[in-house]
Image (spheres, rainbow, N blue to C red):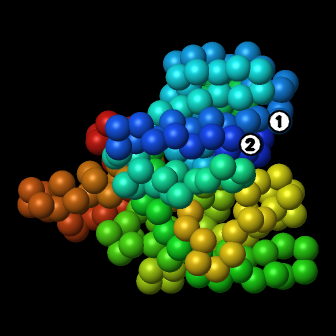
């Protein structure tokens, strides 16, 4: 599990085909954060949870399988590409972002980037299948970065990018047409799932009163 607070921007230093998958070698810069990395540990690469299979001084490698390549942008990475990095959450860490699993839901295109003085607006299209999992002012993960949905249209959403995030992540590499990894908030997924199951089973209490409160969450296992 991660928080979406990026700890380093690394660089791809090797892409090797392996039986339908890829072996990626990633170089990191933040030696304080990554120096004690170990094999079998989870690392988020552009928001995708991957397992370290090999490492050396200043670098580590992961094996990316076909399923991951079909849902994310990792297959488009090339030698020299910049990537957002975050190590797995420790229970004692402060949660600066939100709970991020690193299980990407889909890759989506950047539609527009607007400069607004010191900040920027990033507009991204998303598939209609995920419309029930995104709300205005809710959390969303873009290439591993925990961000807040500022505006929401039918199949477009907007996030505001502060200067620090722009300077310390790969957001500054994006342009219209770039594809990014999206992970929708896990709480929204569970709520949508529970409401869908309850509605399909004919439970009148959910259809007539769809309010989500503490009692409802406890009853449904949250």
Q: Can residue 218 be seen in the rendering of this structure?
A: no
Residue at image location 57% in from the left, 47% down from the top: 47
Q: Position of residue 9 (x, y in %)?
A: 76, 45
Q: Is residue 104 above or below residue 90?
A: below
Residue at image location 52% in from the left, 18% down from the top: 40
Q: Quadrant of the N terminus?
A: top right
Secondary structure beneath disc 1? loop
Q: Is residue 210 above or below residue 103?
A: below
Residue indicated by mark 1:
29
Total numbered labels:
2
Q: Reading the chain from its start, which is encountered first: label 2 or label 1?
A: 2
Q: Residue 78 or 181: which is nearer the viewer?
A: 78
Q: Is residue 85 above or below residue 33?
A: below
Q: Contact (CB < 8 A) between labels 2 and 1? A: yes
Q: CA distance from mark 2 to mark 1?
A: 6 Å
Left or right: 2, with 183 as reference point: right
Residue at image location 84% in from the left, 24% down from the top: 32
Q: Can residue 23 be seen in the rendering of this structure?
A: yes
Q: Is residue 62 above or below residue 36?
A: below
Any mark on residue 10, and which? 2
Left or right: 74, with 173 as reference point: left
Q: Residue 62 or 42: which is nearer the viewer?
A: 62
Q: Position of residue 115 (x, y in %)?
A: 81, 81
Any mark on residue 5, and which? none
Q: Residue 170 or 95: which is nearer the viewer?
A: 170
Q: Residue 57 or 32: which is nearer the viewer?
A: 57
Left or right: 221, with 99 as reference point: left
Extreme residue toward the left, this view: 202
């Amino acid at each position: 599990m991660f928080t979406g607070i990026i700890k380093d921007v690394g660089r791809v230093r090797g892409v090797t085909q392996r039986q339908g998958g890829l072996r990626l070698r990633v170089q990191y810069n933040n030696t304080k954060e990554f120096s004690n990395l170990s094999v079998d540990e989870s690392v988020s690469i552009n928001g995708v949870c991957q397992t370290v299979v090999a490492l050396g001084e200043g670098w580590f490698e992961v094996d990316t399988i076909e399923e991951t390549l079909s849902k994310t942008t990792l297959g488009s990475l090339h030698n020299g590409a910049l990537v957002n990095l975050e190590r797995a959450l420790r229970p004692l860490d402060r949660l600066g972002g939100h709970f991020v699993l690193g299980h990407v839901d889909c890759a989506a295109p950047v539609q527009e980037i607007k400069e607004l003085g010191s900040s920027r607006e990033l507009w991204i299209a998303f598939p209609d299948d995920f419309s029930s999992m995104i709300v205005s002012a809710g959390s969303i993960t873009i290439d591993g970065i925990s961000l807040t949905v500022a505006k929401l249209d039918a199949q477009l959403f907007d996030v505001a990018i502060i200067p620090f995030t722009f300077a310390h992540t790969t957001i500054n590499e994006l342009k219209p047409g770039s594809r990014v990894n999206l992970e929708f908030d896990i709480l929204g997924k569970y709520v949508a799932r529970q409401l869908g199951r309850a509605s399909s089973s004919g439970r009148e209490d959910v259809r007539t009163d769809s309010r989500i409160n503490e009692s409802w969450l406890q009853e449904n296992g949250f």
